[in-house]
Amino acid sequence: MANAKKLSSGNWRIRIFLGTDKSGHKCYKSFTAPTKKQAEREATQWQLAHEKDKDDNNKQKELTVEEAMDSFLDTCRSQGYSPSTICAYLSIRNKSFPELLPLEVSEVTAHQIQQIINAHMMSKKIKTVRNEYYFLKKVMFIYAPDLDLRRIIIARKPKPKKRTFDESLPDHVLVLAREDVDFYLYCNFVLSASLRPSETFALTWGDISKEPITIECDGSLTQYGRISITKASVYSENREYVLKDTKTAAGNRVNYVDWSFFEDLYSLKPRGKDDEQILSLKPNQIGYRWNKLKKRANLPENFVFYDLRHYFATDLAYSGASEEEIRETMGHSSITVTHDHYIEMFKKNKIRSNEKMAQKIRERMSHFMDTGKKNI
């Protein structure tokens, strides 16, 4: 470190040489203090911190991609990421980039990543490849900030095809599922109350009405039951189901369902204690049962269990519910999600509404025209 010099003002100054800039000018870091010791102390503290930062940066560059991914996962765990998100990240870390794992992060190039993406596109779904890439991108953004990934080319996710549903679908599915009580209830909670499978598995008896609630609507009294949706049960990296908050803040909601739904439920399962789970069938056991039912029902091969939830939303849209009402019932994070998923239904609703209005106008005009003719 350079020696401190006394200035004409009486203060002491130390200048530390940092190097030269692009123009060849020498660059210094200056420390000025009333006493020599204070100036030296400030300069020493800065130099130690500066050297530590350099060491930290060097250590960061020496990390392998595997170590960087593990460090990123530790950060996600400490910040309370969803267990299902951690599971997805772990799967990508373990399976998706074996050729990159032993490399130091500073050795990875955008060209290598592009080649891996191109290869994955040949055998995987676009959504899967995009998820893999965005995980890697997050890791490299932190541990290799100089790596420029702006020119990476990756296909856009295709817009989901709007599926149409036959009106007989609920009856058909529920009749076939009735043989397995828990599976039947899963189907019914989705078809009749819009719950996600993870939300259904997390339900306890205390979350649903014990007695009917009478609500007046359009002059008539109807009995409903309440379902309070405040949590979900997801698979963790420890290979067990754990409770977490709903998928989004908007997922916390209360839905009201006709009391006949609850009468059917209580006929199949006597009500337990408020903190007891209603269902014992785990979400990962649904797939096998659904595939068997799908064959018996002659449903399309690409018809997944989650499509039952889309049926509910479609039915709700056709009933004339607004986008905001559907968003609240489904627990979507924003009105944009609702609109993007069910825009075709809203277009048809608008056409149907226009037709109804046109019919009313025709009837009104016809009345006036008839009245006018009589007066003539």
Image (cartoon, helix red, strand yellow):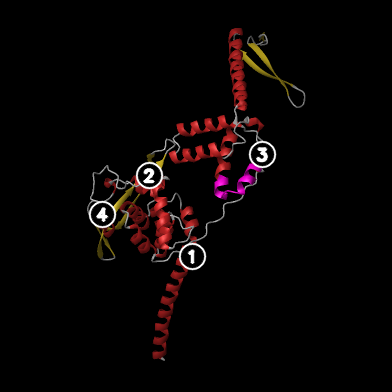
Amino acid beneath label 1: Lys
Residue 229's place in the image compared with 146, above or below, is below
Q: Earlier in the sequence, mark 2 or mark 1?
A: 2
- Which mark is nearer the camera, 3 or 2? 3
Q: Badge 4 is on which residue?
A: 268
Image side of residue 101 versus residue 271, left or right: right
Image side of residue 69 versus residue 244, left or right: right
Q: Badge 3 is on which residue?
A: 112
Q: Position of residue 211 (x, y in %)?
A: 22, 53
What is the tally of numbered marks visible in this picture? 4
Q: Which residues are magenta?
A: 115-130
Q: Residues within 10 Å of mark 2 (few under 14, many from 20)?
A: many
Q: Badge 2 is on which residue?
A: 232
Q: Residues within 10 Å of mark 3 (few under 14, many from 20)?
A: few
Label 4, secondary structure: give it.
Answer: helix
Asked whether residue 210 is drawn in magenta, I would say no
